[in-house]
Image (cartoon, helix red, strand yellow):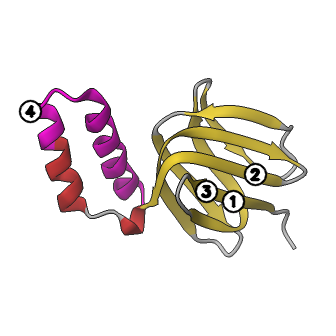
Amino acid sequence: MAAELHVELVAADRSVWSGEATLVVARTTSGDIGVMPGHQPLLGVLESGPVTIRTSDGGTVVAAVHGGFISFADDKLSMLAEIAELADEIDVQRAERALERAKSDTDAASERRAEVRLRAVAVR
């Protein structure tokens, strides 16, 4: 059996994804980070961006994450996000409308959230 890590992705309002993985890639304030089984313990601040999870069965899960924290120790990775949604849950047309609205309102935070949602769908 290949080495695995247990991953929990939790938003402020719900558990988004939980399972076994071989690799997780996320954006932190220190840059992009890849975590595999046996990685050194870490605690970091998540930046808005897509999170990619390579599952133990060979699949890929992508989520749009907006802020939060990431921690890893003893092959257990936890991500507590302010907002997180799986790429499969994202309504592309709605995200595109939100991006246009944010651009016309010059709302940088909303624009960033919409862009991250669209990038997560594209990565998927």
Q: Are marks 1 and 2 in contact (CB under 8 Å)?
A: yes
Residue under the point 22% across and 29% down: 107
Please state which of residues 27 and 34 is positioned toward the viewer in this rendering.
Answer: 27
Which residue bears the numbered disc 4?
Answer: 104
Alpha carbons under labels 4 and 3: distance apart = 31 Å
* Badge number at residue 8: 1
Q: Are marks 4 and 1 in contact (CB under 8 Å)?
A: no
Of mark 1 and mark 2, the one earlier in the sequence is 1
Which residue bears the numbered disc 2?
Answer: 77
Please state which of residues 22 and 48 is positioned toward the viewer in this rendering.
Answer: 48
Q: Are marks 1 and 3 in contact (CB under 8 Å)?
A: yes
Q: Which span of residues is magenta-colored?
A: 100-124
Find residue 18 and report its horizontal and vertical position in percent: 67, 67
Is the residue marked by circle 1 packed among few (<14), some (14-19), or many (20+) residues within 10 Å?
Answer: some
Of mark 4 and mark 2, the one earlier in the sequence is 2
Please state which of residues 123 and 27 is positioned toward the viewer in this rendering.
Answer: 27
Q: Are marks 4 and 3 in contact (CB under 8 Å)?
A: no
Is the residue marked by circle 3 packed among few (<14), some (14-19), or many (20+) residues within 10 Å?
Answer: many
Find residue 96 and report its horizontal and vertical position in percent: 18, 51
Of mark 2 and mark 3, the one earlier in the sequence is 3
